[in-house]
């Protein structure tokens, strides 16, 4: 992993020694971490990581690196987003390789775009290292292909967590319902009753297959299968909790066929 070590002048004339790497850690299975991301962890001076990064991936970090937990969970934010970005800027002024380690992919509902904008505005060099997003990996590990020539020729990825804030516009669930054959919803468990009601109101059949996948690609991965008409009651009965990915569409039926195939081997 190369680094030029060139000094730059950032905001307010402060010298910027290093570079920030926005690295996707993938969904959990350490075998899905990219080689480029792993290499950066092994030579990083500082790693600022999210809550959903698995312990096995954290174990890849250079033992001499400064490690900072900036994890966010519903109702428990260890650091505000603005604090995290300011921390990245400050660390780049004193360290050569600063890694912002994010679960999944930095640019898929990971606020990576916002952090990149702020770093560029502050005059801090920044590079993005993509990761495998949970919306792709979790269904694959559950035996659900998101596209299939018979069942689905299009996929929509959407956030189910509609927090207040101008950075996140309200989801048009009616358009989502008719936009593609497969819908993958991130962070949708807490708002599932509302989402299901909106999709039903938009005309999706109550018989539409639904899968919920919790802790996707990890050894403790859990799955719950139902339909648009049954899934809310099933979640309550099973006490199924976040974090989970929801997959809606006919491709979910294929898990019965692919369940007979070998599951991906999850590394410890």
Image (spheres, grey):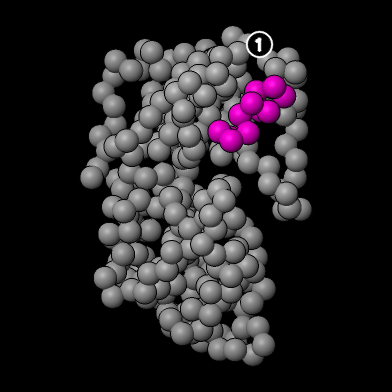
Give yes or no for residue 203 being in the magenta stretch: no
Left or right relative to 11: residue 226: left
Q: What percent of the width, then of the height, locates residue 246?
A: 53, 29
Left or right relative to 256: residue 191: right
Q: What percent of the width, then of the height, locates residue 43?
A: 32, 71
Q: Residue at x 58, y 74 (%)?
A: 86
Left or right relative to 116: residue 145: left
Residue nearest the viewer, comparing 71 with 21: 71
Picture quadrant of residue 261: top left
Q: Residue at x 40, y 17 (%)?
A: 255
On the question of residue 57 being in view, the answer is yes
Magenta span: predominant SS is helix
On the question of residue 179 being in view, the answer is no
Residue nearest the viewer, comparing 80 with 94: 80
Q: What percent of the width, then of the height, locates residue 37?
A: 38, 58
Range shown magenta: 188-198
Identify residue for label 1. 205
Q: Is residue 172 above or below residue 206?
A: below
Q: Residue at x 72, y 29 (%)?
A: 173
Q: Which residue is drawn at 43% across and 81% down?
A: 95
Left or right relative to 218: residue 162: right
Picture quadrant of residue 12: bottom right
């Amino acid at each position: 992993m190369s680094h030029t070590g060139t000094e730059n002048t950032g905001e307010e004339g402060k010298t910027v020694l290093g570079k920030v790497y926005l690295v996707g850690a993938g969904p959990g299975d350490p075998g899905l971490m990219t080689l480029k991301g792993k290499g950066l962890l092994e030579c990083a001076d500082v790693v600022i990581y999210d809550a959903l990064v698995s312990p096995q991936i954290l174990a890849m970090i250079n033992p001499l690196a400064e490690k900072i937990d900036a994890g966010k969970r519903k109702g428990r934010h260890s650091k505000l987003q603005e604090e995290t970005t300011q921390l990245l800027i400050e660390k780049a002024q004193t360290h050569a390789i600063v890694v912002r380690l994010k679960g999944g992919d930095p640019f898929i509902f990971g606020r990576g775009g916002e952090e990149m904008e702020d770093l560029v505005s502050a005059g801090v060099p920044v590079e993005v290292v993509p990761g495998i997003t949970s919306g792709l990996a979790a269904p694959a590990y559950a035996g659900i292909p998101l596209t299939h020539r018979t069942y689905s020729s299009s996929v929509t990825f959407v956030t189910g967590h509609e927090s207040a804030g101008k950075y996140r516009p309200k989801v048009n669930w009616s358009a989502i319902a008719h936009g593609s054959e497969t819908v993958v919803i991130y962070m949708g468990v807490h708002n599932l009753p509302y989402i299901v009601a909106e999709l039903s109101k938009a005309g999706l059949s109550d018989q539409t297959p639904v899968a919920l996948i919790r802790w996707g690609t990890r050894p403790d991965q859990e799955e719950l299968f139902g339909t648009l008409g049954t899934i809310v009651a099933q979640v309550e009965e099973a006490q199924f909790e976040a974090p989970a990915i929801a997959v809606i569409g006919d491709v979910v039926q294929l898990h019965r066929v692919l369940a007979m195939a070998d599951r991906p081997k999850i590394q410890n």
